[in-house]
Amino acid sequence: MSNRPNARIRQAKTGMATARPGMAVMRPEVVLPAPRASRVAFYRSERWKQVRGRIQGRGAECAACGRRGRLVVDHLLGHDDERQAERAAALLGVPYTPGWEERFWHGPFVLLCSDNGCHSNKTVEETAGRLTDWIRRWQSGELKDG
């Protein structure tokens, strides 16, 4: 996929990506990610600090590995991929809300440690399009084993 804004928008509208000029390749519709600058502003807001404080007050251990340590409030449905967020919501049995801004405030959330790498591991899986795989392993308790 091209990094040029117009190419990304054209691809999102048509569902087609051009591999070479004149050669079209079928791809699923692309949903543009939440702009990083927008997310940074959300994370720095007083409202997020209040939401994060409420979530952190719910537990003292990592939902993935069970260890105590520095915990990060993470979004289970993510910001960037609407289709992945919709599949994750179905897997978790929670309502799906289109648009990352609304999900940002209402979750669902999970507490993950940064000391043991659980937050980073989940982010890597999500970025690679494997969020539902991570959720299945989390739900089965597999992440606590290793």
Image (cartoon, rainbow, N blue to C red):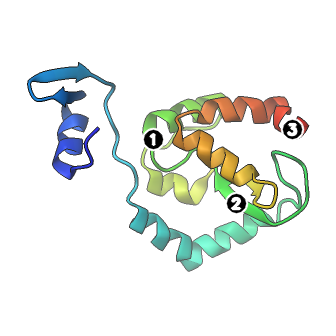
Residue 128's mark? none
Along the line of sight, the residue nearer the viewer: 122 or 97? 122
**Mark 1 residue type:** Asp
Q: Is residue 5 above or below residue 126?
A: below
Near mark 3 (Cα within 10 A), the count class, few <14, some 14-19 or many ≥20, is few
User: Mark 3 — residue?
Assistant: 146
Residue, x 46% and y 52% (percent of image)?
100
Q: Quadrant of the N terminus?
A: top left
Type of residue at label 2?
Answer: Val
* Residue placed most toward the observer, 94 or 64: 64
Q: Choose top left, top right, bottom left or bottom right for residue 49.
A: bottom right
State how many labels appear: 3
Q: Secondary structure at mark 1?
A: loop
The image shows residue 131, relative to residue 64, as above or below, that is above
Q: Which residue is mark 2?
A: 73
Q: Earlier in the sequence, mark 3 or mark 1?
A: 1
Q: Earlier in the sequence, mark 2 or mark 1?
A: 2
Residues at marks 3 and 1, CA–CA distance in whole angstroms: 27 Å
Q: Is residue 77 left or right of residue 33?
A: right
**Marks 3/2: CA distance?**
21 Å
Image spot of residue 86 (x, y percent)? 51, 34
Other residues around mark 1 within 10 Å, as few (<14) / some (14–19) / many (≥20): some
Write down the residue under mark 1: 81
